Amino acid sequence: MRRALITLVGLSLLAGCGSDGEGSPPSPELTEQYACGYGFYASNAEQTVGLFINIADFEAAGNGDVPATSQLDDGTWRAELRFGTDLFANWCDDVLEPGEPTPEVGETWQLTGTIEIDQLPPAGQSGLASATLSAVEARGPNNELIAFDVFDIENEFWGTFAG
């Protein structure tokens, strides 16, 4: 967990170096990570910016059929940088209690880049998954750009779902 937190802090710093600064929102400080499902997720502490990388084929993921290396925009993954409020409210929780916040997405930017899977739990089991992301860019609707350097990300509960 400590390694993941250090990595995400590093990601935040690297994002600051990659933003073009013209028309782009401030570089996100993705210091929080969220585990669950078949993907990799991170956000800033306020949950107003979120990195969402989900595998597109859940059946293949459950069978351990995840490519060692692929592009975030080749159809294997759904990869987005989302802006909004409470983006991870009730994350991996199937019971919505009265008064709890719900995620509200205001804008979604598509991600490109390379994902290399470093570790997955055995097929059909949940556990730690890790990946290295490189040459990642988020592009906004008005051609805004946030570029990230190489970074590692983890999901401690790959294959775990609410319910």
Image (cartoon, rainbow, N blue to C red):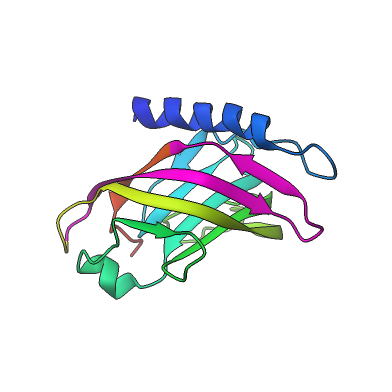
Task: Report the side of 58 relative to 78 (left or right).
Answer: left
- x and y percentages locating residue 28 in the rendered image: 65, 37
Image height check: is 61 above or below 21? below
Q: Is residue 4 above or below residue 147?
A: above
Is 69 or 159 nearer to us in this picture? 69
Query: Please, is residue 7 above or below residue 67 in the view?
Result: above
* Residue at image location 45% in from the left, 36% down from the top: 151
Q: Residue at x 45, y 52 (%)?
A: 114
**In the image: residue 49, left or right of residue 9:** right
- Work out whether residue 106 or residue 26 is closer to the camera in this orientation and state it: 26
Residue 51 position, x and y percent, is 55, 49
Magenta stretch: helix, strand or loop mostly: strand
- State which region is magenta: 125-151
Task: Check if residue 133 falls in the magenta segment.
Answer: yes
Quarter of image, res 161: bottom left
Left/right of residue 18 with respect to residue 141 in the rendered view: left
